[in-house]
Image (cartoon, rainbow, N blue to C red):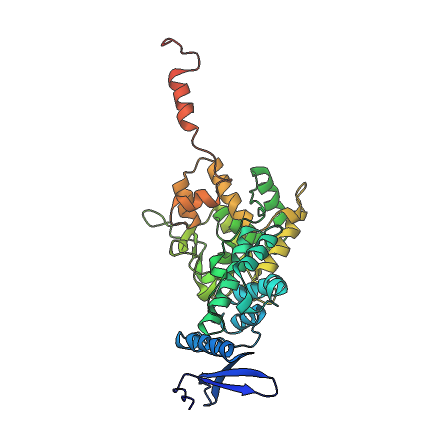
Amino acid sequence: MTKRRSRGDGGLHWDEQRQRWIATVTVGYTPAGKRIVRKSSGKTKTEANNALRQKIREYQDGLSIPTTGYTVADAVTDWLTYGLTGLDPETAKNYTLLANGHVIPAIGARKLRELSATDVDKWLASKAKTLSTRTLRLLHSITNRAVNRAMARDRVMRNVVALCKVPTGTAGRPSKSLNYQQAKALLAAAESSSLHAYVVLSLLTGARTEELRALTWEHVDLIGRPDTDPPIPPAIHVWHSVRSHGDTKTRKSRRSLALPLRCVQVLTAHRVTQGEPRPDDYVLRSKAGTQLDRHNVLRGFRAIIAAVPDMNPADWTPRELRHSFVSLLSDNGMSIEQIADLCGHSGTSITESVYRHQLRPILLNGAVTMDRIFGPDDTSGS
């Protein structure tokens, strides 16, 4: 007499129509109470039994993988739909564009259970020929998170994406800075632009573009307190940005920046043109009174660049005003520690790594000093 299988061992029966042994096992129940059954088959009873044991092993390990053709595209789409909660809308939009533009078209049709580390390596290597290293890291991160989510929902047994390293991509566009003459020409060209105040503030204070776009009149002091000891100069208080939750990039970025006289003059005139705005009004705003977005700023900035002789608008972006701020201060002898404080960096290492091309080299000071002490012709010791 055939021994009856124990509860949880699954079942095995002959399918006359298919002429195959069918193994089944219950792996759980839906929220509605419907039983979830996984099936496998074999030409022989032994083959079907082996497949059944594998199903049971996966079930006991919490890895009850469906037999349906769940693809990489399914996993990525699921992550984009449910896994971006709480992210800044611009970040979510960027992830979606990258996923739809590079992940899904390339490896989306691959069944997730069949995806190998070699597949991922080949895909990233092909993308490295045209994309920057930063973009490659984002593509790897998107795919890795999507597969992790699928693994947590028993869609796949392991995440092969996590086993792959990100290759080095193409070199990104190097940042650059305006020299003194270019900066003067840009300030002159900006005078007739609606972004005049933005250009002056960014170039003369070094504030980030996302900080300036979030600046309200409540955080602008055009008078200061000249009667105190020491006097308090006019300043802007950089306490917010357009980042998620309105926070500045780092805690050190929350700072007050004294305003050069030119900034005070431009902001005073700008305030008059806005008709005595309310404290919570944006300093830099669209014609409708709303906050500027980065596309508004980029278009307006490149229109200004187009008016400057020998400068190509396609070669410049607003963030390079901040790089120019660092370069001009360094060229005029300001220490890197002071520049780091003005930039809102937590230490000089960030300033040196991000703005290394804009900082005047200081390692020659020892050689210059020794030449002054001994002189190039002092050979008396030889």
Where residue 124 sits in the image (x, y, percent)?
57, 55
Q: Nearer the viewer, residue 117 or 152?
A: 117
Asked if 166 appears above or below 335 in the picture, the reply is below
Quadrant for the N terminus in the image: bottom left
Residue closest to the far left: 229
Q: Nearer the viewer, residue 259 or 333?
A: 333
Where residue 370 sits in the image (x, y, percent)?
39, 21
* Residue drawn at x 57%, y 44% as measured from the top left: 174
Q: How many marks?
A: 0
Asked if 196 appears above or below 83 in the picture, the reply is above
* Residue drawn at x 48%, y 48% as measured from the top left: 205
Please indicate whether residue 151 sits to the left or right of residue 131 in the image: left
Residue closest to the far front: 1
Where residue 150 sits in the image (x, y, percent)?
49, 71
Quadrant for the C terminus in the image: top left
Asked if 66 appears above or below 3 in the picture, the reply is above
